[in-house]
Image: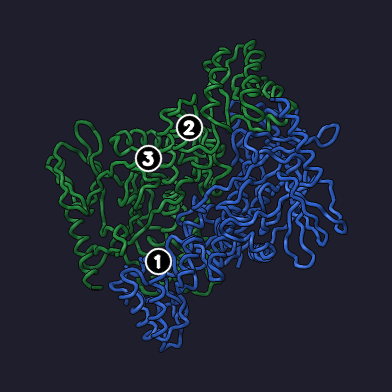
Chain colours: A green, B blue
């Protein structure tokens, strides 16, 4: 159950001042330069899928909406800023009476997303659109990172249950809480983080720790006490002393002596150390021989997608994985490198595109106010490509569509039997929230459904096929004309 | 300035329900088994220094105190727990009227700490001492990880300024906020995270983003606008188009035309991409030739201790580093593996030690209620060793002290000219906070002072000397008698 009152209390945490200091110095600068009403467009996007994967799972939009809905500078914030002695009073007044008026678009959570496509687009007064950079990045970077990692881990588990166990090793409290949320979006079945169940209505679960076993004089006594209290929820941690010589035999004794007479069946045993493949195979045999074929085997201990894939391939007898630190921190690649770039400004002549040049080719941005379309095959419903175009471009579904690689432009493909879906939805209209986030479980279902529309080649762990992210003709031409302009300038 | 009102508001965030679900099922179990008043002892410790380093920097105690001071179950929490239909009403009553009564000891923040020593020790009713496991680990693991990483990065910078820039890539909001706090403790001079200045009275700083430069029609215009607004705080980001052909020449023009006539000197230029060594050397020459020898050079862009050490060795001309994602996530090793283990319980016969056996030798715990002493040389004041002993052991400073390796026990050393310091301090007495945290800047100073007491061999990046963490004779004997008892049992 979700307790709405509490949910609201937590949502109202005011994170307005969680902002890179330069957003404020720039804001004051725009203000003093008379540019505070200048309308600007920013895109948030990433350049590379972590872990060499083929796609990411979008996450964090609900928290972004909460943040933008709660933007408000407190009196103490203004007082603090004043004490820095670099902000003009007019700017401080502006902040004190701050009203968010931007338009914001985002790709809904759970969708597979790809490099270079705008996950979030903001249109509004430069001073506002700039200010929210830090929190847009922080929110989307974090949750998309964890949802993507969870998705990899769950794929490796090939349908077996994956439980998120990482709170104690998370990077801060929100790392645990929103990390749990993102893990569910990525495919986990439950989390150990209790508050996340309260906040997001996602299942929390857990069993016993080594300390339970240690507290009693023997392992047998510890299991017995548990079975008497929780006969319908017996999951024994069997590796405190010795899995095969003590843990499993004691578990079986208790199943026989305590559960059986009461008509209960055991739920599972958990192994948290040692050679997983060997121990689970031997444990399975012992449980089966004792008549407990239905007793599941859970393993934990520094797991990730690679270890899971390995032990599954080796025939380990595992029903469920508890995955902790390597999921909640995305250990193999703990940084999601989303960026937020100015792509256009409005002037008397209309929308003027802006570009960021770099000697590093992949750091060059796509200029202009844009839209993203996902193209699906009409028969198979599989995703064929994403096309990034200018905001006023329309793809006419009846007409043949030619897509081409933005670098190797001679690589072209004509598509005829297709339909399109616009990826971004509007979440703020002139500063007012206009989008209702689905529940986390609905988002999880969407992620499963939309991921199934990607070809297996894109889902591959190693060297996945690069899904097509193409530019429309118009956008390609615009980008190249700007590139020529600037490179000519610094020849 | 610190705004105390706001600080209090933030501190009061109730994180009671940020707990692994099994702490609750175990709590209910202890309760139902009549063990809720059983007094238990737990140690929080880690087993390995991240990145192969020689020591860690303790951090997070202040937030741990806040958490423990705010432990309170809300009515909605009880209602939510009741809805799970596994907790007995007496246990829910107990939670609703929860009163924290534990004794807690911790090593104060800023101290260098080493594997296997109890960073935090808890004594109290098992139900309480168990419950707080998740948050003790989460809090200390996170901040100690980041303080330790920051300390490595700052050492690599060899006295140059290091600024924390990572909020946008942090793992959640608290990852940014408490990560900024821990970065300062580890040695950073400032953070870009504005709210962290408000909350902890640590310096926030920042300059301009590429978007400032892009917004204006030319880089020259962008710099000019900035210089006119902030003549006393001119730090230009010079890599939006081309560092050497555009950024530096434009910066110098503005220094000449805007700052000089007003009598101002430039502060710095910042380079955020490209070959740092080459670009900073050339930029330094250009600035010097133009008469701006005092204009500092700041670099950023995916830096860590290894890149910093490299570019410093190559003679890069750098005054300050802005370090972001690789610091705020401790990218090279983003998990701090602190654990929390039951080490003793009280019974009619006194304090009974408990041990956790493992086939993995380093996972075997040190049993008993313990103390840690740091031994210093009387003349040099350098740290010689830490000794973990039982709580009632006293090291008599006048007497010769024999220390020995707990594994290679024939390696022995006699120490005579020494004094000792007990590392842990009591932070809670029967549930009441009895320790006042120093300010973050005081903690940072302590970290510098205490780190200087470690031999250079311990400070080394690669293959540091292992600082001695020895057990007292009594503790060693206790541990080995328990080990024999259990291994005999499962022969």
Q: Residue at x 50, y 46 (%)?
A: A329
Mark 1, Cα crowd under 10 Å, few <14 / some 14-19 / many 20+, is: some
Q: Which residue is identified by label 2?
A: A162
At which x and y percent is residue B200?
Answer: 60, 61
Mark 3, Cα crowd under 10 Å, few <14 / some 14-19 / many 20+, is: many
**One can see residue B399 in this view:** yes
Which quadrant would the N terminus of chain B be assigned to in this image? bottom right
B166 vs A110: above or below:
below
Instruction: Judge depth for marks 3 and 1 and give the one in front.
Output: 1
Q: CA distance from mark 3 to mark 2?
A: 18 Å
Q: Nearer the viewer, residue B209 or A321?
A: A321
Q: Secondary structure at mark 3?
A: loop
Q: Which residue is identified by label 1?
A: B272
Q: Secondary structure at mark 1?
A: loop
Q: Nearer the viewer, residue B287 or B115?
A: B115
Residue A110, numbered circle: 3
Q: Nearer the viewer, residue B330 or A185?
A: B330
* Mark 3 or 2, nearer chain start: 3
Report whether mark 3 lies on the same chain as mark 1: no
At which x and y percent is residue A257?
Answer: 66, 13
């Amino acid at each position: 159950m979700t307790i709405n009152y509490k949910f609201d209390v937590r949502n109202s945490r005011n994170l307005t001042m969680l902002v890179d200091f330069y957003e404020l110095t720039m804001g004051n600068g725009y203000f003093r330069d008379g540019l505070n009403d200048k309308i600007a467009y920013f895109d948030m996007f990433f350049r590379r899928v972590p872990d060499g994967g083929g796609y990411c799972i979008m996450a964090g939009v609900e928290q972004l909406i909460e943040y933008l809905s709660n933007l408000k500078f407190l009196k103490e914030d203004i007082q603090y800023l004043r004490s820095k002695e670099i902000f003009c009073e007019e700017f401080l007044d502006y902040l004190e009476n701050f009203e968010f008026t931007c338009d914001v678009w985002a790709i809904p959570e759970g969708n597979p997303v790809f490099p270079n496509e705008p996950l979030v687009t903001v249109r509004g007064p430069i001073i506002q659109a700039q200010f929210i950079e830090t929190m847009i990045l922080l929110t989307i970077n974090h949750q998309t990172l964890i949802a993507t990692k969870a998705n990899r881990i769950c794929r490796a588990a090939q349908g077996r249950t994956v439980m998120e166990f990482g709170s104690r090793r998370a990077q801060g409290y929100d790392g645990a809480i929103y990390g749990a949320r993102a893990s569910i979006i990525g495919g986990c079945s439950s989390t150990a983080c209790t508050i996340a169940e309260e906040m997001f209505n996602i299942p929390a679960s857990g069993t016993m720790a080594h300390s339970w076993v240690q507290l009693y004089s023997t392992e047998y006594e510890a299991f017995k006490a548990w079975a008497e209290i929780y006969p319908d929820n017996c999951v024994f941690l069997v590796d405190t002393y010795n899995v095969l010589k003590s843990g499993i035999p004691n578990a079986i004794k208790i199943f026989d002596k305590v559960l059986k007479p009461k008509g209960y069946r055991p739920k599972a045993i958990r192994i948290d150390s040692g050679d997983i493949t060997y121990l689970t195979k031997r444990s399975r045999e012992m449980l089966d021989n004792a008549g407990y074929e239905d007793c599941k085997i859970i393993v934990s201990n520094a797991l990730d997608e690679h270890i899971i894939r390995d032990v599954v391939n080796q025939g380990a007898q595992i029903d469920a994985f508890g995955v902790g630190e390597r999921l909640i921190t995305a250990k193999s690649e703990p940084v999601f490198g989303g960026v937020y770039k100015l792509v256009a400004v409005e002037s008397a002549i209309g929308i003027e595109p802006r570009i960021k040049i770099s000697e590093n080719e992949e750091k060059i941005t796509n200029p202009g106010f844009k839209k993203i379309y996902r193209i699906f095959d009409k028969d198979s419903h599989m995703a064929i490509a994403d096309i990034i175009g200018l905001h006023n471009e329309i793809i006419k579904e009846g007409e043949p569509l030619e897509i081409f690689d933005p670098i190797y432009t001679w690589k072209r493909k004509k598509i005829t039997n297709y339909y399109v879906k616009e990826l971004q939805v509007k979440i703020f209209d002139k500063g007012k929230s206009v989008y209702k986030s689905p529940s986390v479980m609905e988002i999880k279902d969407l992620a499963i459904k939309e991921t199934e529309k990607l070809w297996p080649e894109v889902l591959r762990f190693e060297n996945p096929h690069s899904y097509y992210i193409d530019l429309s003709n118009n956008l390609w031409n615009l980008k190249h004309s700007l590139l020529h302009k600037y490179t000519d300038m610094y020849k």
